[in-house]
């Protein structure tokens, strides 16, 4: 794999639950595939981040940009696998209106449940690995 000279830029931040889930997985894949990886803090690299907005509006992270040795973009992945996105979407629909008195409490409970899920459920990890492999497979083989 070293002969391909693949490189990856990872836009991330230490406060992000999705990054806590995905960065270690991607880092291990990069190690196994001999991909040189650089980690950039999202808020210190907004010009780059704004080229990879989720749904054209959100600075969602992590974002992994796979390039060749010339810097040509080959593939992009992030911020979530479809299964993780489904989990988030389902739980957000259960939250009260943003202006409701218990919104902050319920949102905090949702974040705690998300943290527990991403740190204890191997099916979540598998979904991330599978989705990354599907996106990058042609470049990693």
Image (cartoon, helix red, strand yellow):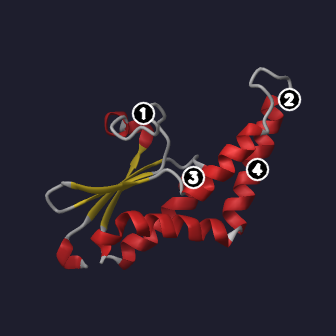
Q: CA distance from mark 3 to mark 2?
A: 24 Å
Determine which of the numbered discs, if any, sits on residue 112 in the image.
Answer: 4
Nearer the camera: disc 1 or disc 3? 1
Q: Earlier in the sequence, mark 4 or mark 2?
A: 2
| Of the image marks 3 and 4, the number of the one nearer the N terminus | 3
Mark 2 secondary-structure assignment: loop
Instruction: Give percent across and percent down for residue 8.
Output: 31, 60
Label 4: state its secondary structure.
helix
**Can you see residue 65?**
no
Few, some or many C-alpha atoms within 10 Å of disc 4 (few <14, some 14-19, many ≥20)?
few
For the point 57% across and 66% down, the residue is 127
Residue at numbered disc 1? 56
Circle 1: is it few (<14), some (14-19), or many (20+) Cα within 10 Å?
A: few
| Helix, strand or loop status at disc 1 | loop
Residue 47 pos. (x, y %): 32, 34
Spatial distance from mark 1 to mark 3, Cα to Cα?
Answer: 19 Å
Q: Position of residue 121 (x, y in %)?
A: 70, 68
Mark 3 crowd level (few <14, some 14–19, many ≥20, 10 Å Cα): many
**Residue at 68 percent of width and 52 percent of height:** 87
Q: Is residue 5 above or below residue 49?
A: below
**Mark 3 — residue?**
18
Report the disc number at residue 131: none
The answer to the question of whether label 3 and label 2 lie on touching residues, with beta carbons closer than 8 A, is no
């Amino acid at each position: 794999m070293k002969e391909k000279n693949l490189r990856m830029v990872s836009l991330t931040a230490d406060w992000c639950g999705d990054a806590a889930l995905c960065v270690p997985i991607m880092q291990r894949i990069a190690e196994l595939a001999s991909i040189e990886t650089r980690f950039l803090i999202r808020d210190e690299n907004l010009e780059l981040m704004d080229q990879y907005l989720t749904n054209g509006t959100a600075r969602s992270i992590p974002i992994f940009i796979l390039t060749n040795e010339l810097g040509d973009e080959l593939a992009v992945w992030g911020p979530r696998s479809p299964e993780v996105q489904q989990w988030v979407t389902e739980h957000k629909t259960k939250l009260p209106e943003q202006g409701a008195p218990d919104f902050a409490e319920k949102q905090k409970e949702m974040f705690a449940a998300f943290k527990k899920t991403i740190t204890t459920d191997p099916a979540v990890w598998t979904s991330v690995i599978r989705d990354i492999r599907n996106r990058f497979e042609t470049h990693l083989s």
